[in-house]
Image (spheres, rainbow, N blue to C red):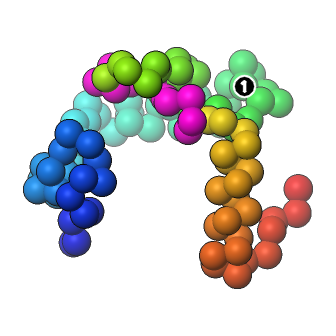
Amino acid sequence: MASPPAGSMPGHSSADVHEHVLRGAPSTSTPSDAATGLWAATSPLLAGRGRLYLEDCEVARVSGPDKPMDNGGVRAYAIAPDAAEHLWEWSLAATGTAPIPR
């Protein structure tokens, strides 16, 4: 497995990242690991909603740019609709893939 280039994750060396990938992220149990996905698929609270970042069976809070991500959350740029559209279009062009009809 190749390590990401140094500096690709601020505050972490490529050795730190590689070790984390090899060990795996901390996990509690298979049922709790699957809980958010199951909640996302079945919760009436999410009916008709999309493009959400989910975490621990709830919609993740937006974390400020100067706050550590140790306690979860999502950065605003990761859920920005304009950025998502730009990434989608770039991905289609880069892979030569046709868009999926909506």
| Residue at figure coordinates x 52%, y 18% from the top left | 61
Q: Is residue 57 above or below residue 7?
A: above
Q: Is residue 39 magenta?
A: no
Amino acid type of the residue that numbered disc 1 sits on in the rendered structure: Leu
Q: Is residue 4 above or below residue 75?
A: below
| Residue at figure coordinates x 20%, y 39% from the top left | 11
Lateral position of residue 55 relative to residue 11, left or right? right
At which x and y percent is residue 66? Answer: 37, 21
Q: Which quarter of the picture shows residue 81?
A: top right
- Residue in the foreground of this view, choosing between 17 and 90: 90
- Residue in the foreground of this view, choosing between 11 and 71: 11
Q: Is residue 91 above or below residue 63?
A: below
At which x and y percent is residue 30? Answer: 33, 39
Q: Which residue is tagged 1?
A: 46
At which x and y percent is residue 9? Answer: 28, 47
Indicate the secondary structure of the residue bearing disc 1: helix
Q: Which contiguous range is marked in magenta?
A: 69-78
Q: Which quarter of the picture shows residue 96?
A: bottom right
| Residue at figure coordinates x 66%, y 45% from the top left | 83
Q: Looking at this rendering, what residue extends furthest in the bottom direction?
A: 96
Of the 4 image quadrants, the one containing the N terminus is bottom left
